[in-house]
Image: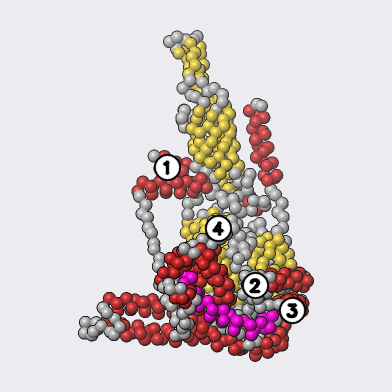
Amino acid sequence: MSMKKYYVCALVLLFILPVFAQRTYKTKEYHLSFKENGSLEGNQKMPTVLKKLDKLIINLPNQTPLNPSDKINKFKDDLLSFYFDRKSPFYWYITYSDFRSSSDIGEQMIQKYNVINNIDAEFNGISYPLNEFWLPPATTDVKISLIKRFEQNKVLLEHIKNTSNLYDSSWEIYIPFLDTLREKVLPSALRIHDLLQREKLVSSTPQFNQEILQELIRVDPYREHIHSLFKRVALPNMKWMNQWYWYTKAVPKINPFFRDPQKLLLKTEELLVLAKERLKLFDSYLTNSLSSGIPNGFKSFNEVKKEHTALMNGVAELENLKKNLQLEKSLYDKWLATLKFTSQPLNESTLYISDKETIRWMHHYDGGQKYKSLNIDNTLPSQIADRDQIIALVYNVPDSVVLDLNAKDSTIIPRTKLAEALDPFEKALLQSLNGVDAMTTLFGKWFPVLNPGSITFPSGGIHSLAGSIGVSADNLTELVTLDQIAYNNLIKEFEDTYSELKWLMDQTPIPAQIFQLKGEENKKMPLHTEVHNVEETLHKEGNRSVTYKLAVKGKTGAPVITQTYTKYARTYFWPALGAVYIPNSRDASVFDEKTGQFSTSAKVDNFEVIAGVKIYPWGTNISRDMKTFKNTYWNNLRGNQFVTSRLFGFLGLGMRHKFLKNYVGGLGFDIVPGFSVQTGANLLFQKRYELENGKVKNEYERPVYNWYIGLSLDPTIVPQIVNIFR
């Protein structure tokens, strides 16, 4: 192919490829899921950009329920699994008649409970079939309102009323005993269970384990008492639980609802007051220790200090427990209040629609989960075009909370992607040369025991067995070590006891208020969405770094959200250094006047170092983040198109030979920003002679054209490469 044809083809490609590179955008479908309280699900990912005609589908709890027969079949499967579970502590207490009764009750209740819609969704104040909404092209935002219908509460309240006579509250007198088991037995039981589970991964039969045996010795004296308590608590309420298996998914629970932590909160507050009073006494003693003696019960001053430290830690733990219980109480009160309502507006969320002129990037956060990000992975770029906007949307914000925006920006110098990629290597090398400090942090936690009373159990079990055969409890380790069968029996007895203990620990009394509830209406909206357009108060153009912070209004301390990103302007010119190869010979003819002959000079070889400027006709994002809009023509407006934004013209100088008389020009393509391939023409001025009678009459220079192919780099990375390979 001649040079002329070569350049014609290159120019045709330069203007034709962008046309084929523009891809038609296909509308997308996004599902947004909400919880029953109206809050946006915190484990889902939100769309970073929405476009006209995209489709929103709202998934609401119980809004489009499964076919009742599917739920009934699922319930029956769960119930059957529970009925045949030999590891369940209820296995020996339930009959086939109980199973049939539970199955019939569950089928009836699921049919009543399953057919009612709980929440309605409105888009810009209008309800749409199936909660599906296509984003209109004429608007820039859409508001999604959730209105909860508490019709299911009527079913629950009616069922509570009809079955309340089956609930036997007499079991609640054993709660102090359960608290004692929670303190003295549960930690050892959990430890044994954990160790046994690990051993089962290695062997199907129990292997003797010294630690397990020691924990078994602690648990065994309480085994018969646990079994007795289980029967006294569970059996009187079997008919009550039988009525609620459909609601608990075949899990036996005395309280199928939330627990009321009020009593535990009061007990904690009482213990906290006593602990603080005792701490004051110790503070007073330590302050006046030189003039007073050691308190009764202590042998030395160090023992007093040790007790003082333990009290301080105990007070801190009780304060934390009190705080958690107060939070749980608040959640319980809210649930109890919701149970009596027939309807309530729950939440209003806002989403923004983008167009080719302005992309409205959305930063999504969940105010109900410590403001964690909800954006879809790998869709939120670290930089955006200066024509676009960032909008911070904080969902699930309580009605009493308002967030303040503080945004600042500063001018930055743009860098190529290759230069950014080399930063970690350069930094790592410099750190290895200068030394990096290592740091190890050890964490410890003091865990106090909350003593619920002075309830005690008589010793027995394995200890009594040891006494009957003339062996002390301290020597039981040796005895069981010699008898694997005895050890296996202890494990089997523990597993039966553990299932009963675990069930007992999970039971809570039913709050009396539940039996007194009546339906009513609530108009208060508990949640809302905070919307903040970060760009409103900032400069609109240029290469800038932007940091915005959102803080709770009226509260001091660190902001709840801090985010930094960059904005870039399209680049049309960028410097480059390169190395090229010129296939054709660039040898020159040199005339020697002494001999009157021409000779060939090979001083100019086929390799050239070039320096010049890239020219991007459509502009480019020089530090392009390719995570955005790969399949739309929107990229072209922002310098991110795969072809048009990488294609450039080049003008430059040859640096190795005949400086300022050695030029290059051509076309190139960025492999990555900062590293590209290119081809074009090399124009080299070579000396020519006009002879007369074998003498040089006139000397002049004439350009000679050759084509070249080569690579080019961002010149700003040269110092980085020097640092890496020095």
Q: Which residues are magenta?
A: 215-242
Of circles 1 and 2, the one toward us is 2
Q: Position of residue 429 (x, y in %)?
A: 40, 46
Give the CA separation, mark 1 to mark 2.
52 Å
The residue lying at 48 percent from left, 24 percent from top is 604
- Residue matched to label 3: 97
Q: Earlier in the sequence, mark 2 or mark 4?
A: 2
**Could you say whether the residue bearing mark 3 is in a helix, strand or loop?**
helix
Identify residue type, mark 1. Ile
Q: Please indicate whether residue 86 sits to the left or right of residue 698 in the image.
A: right
The tag on residue 724 is: 1
The residue lying at 63 percent from left, 87 percent from top is 168
Of circles 1 and 3, the one toward us is 3
Is residue 591 in view from this perspective?
yes
Q: Earlier in the sequence, mark 1 or mark 2?
A: 2
Of circles 2 and 3, the one toward us is 3
Identify residue type, mark 4. Ser
- Residue matched to label 2: 35
Q: Residue furthest left?
A: 291
Identify residue type, mark 2. Lys
- Residue matched to label 4: 203
